[in-house]
Amino acid sequence: MNPVFVFAAAGGAILLLLLNGAAAKPVRWIGKLAVKMTAGAFMLFILNAAGAGIGVHIPINAGTSAVSGLLGLPGIAALYVIKTYILI
């Protein structure tokens, strides 16, 4: 794809949002999702740091952060069960 076209489309989208105003609801939803994913990554970091001595490690990526952030402790438990018993 031509870089000029990409930058023109991005510039046009930014100009359109500046003129019309961004819709507040989708931006708020994306912000809440980002905060939950960050909290999920932090919970996984704490689990990995605390469980290093007993061999508990769940990789931290977008998928595991989303599961642990949106589902909380049951999500972390599900990730641990999946990693331990299903993925062996």
Image (cartoon, helix red, strand yellow):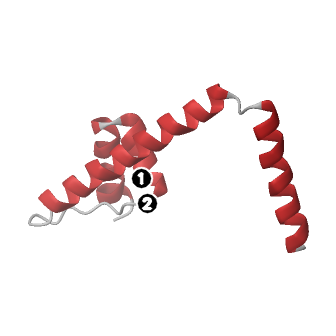
Q: Position of residue 7 (x, y in %)?
A: 82, 64
Label 1 sits on what residue type?
Thr
Q: Position of residue 72 (x, y in %)?
A: 32, 36
Q: Name the secondary structure under disc 1.
A: helix
Residue 16 figure quarter: top right
Residue 1 sits above or below residue 65 on the image: below
The answer to which of 12 and 46 lies nearer the viewer is: 12
Identify the disc placed on residue 61.
2
Q: Which residue is mark 1?
A: 64
Tell me what residue is drawn at x 82 percent, y 46 percent. 15
- Quadrant, the C terminus: bottom left
Q: Position of residue 19 (x, y in %)?
A: 81, 36
67 vs 13, left or right, is left
The answer to which of 22 and 59 lies nearer the viewer is: 22
Identify the disc placed on residue 35.
none
Q: How many numbered callouts?
A: 2
63 vs 53, left or right, is right
Q: Name the secondary structure under disc 2.
A: loop
Q: Position of residue 86 (x, y in %)?
A: 38, 57
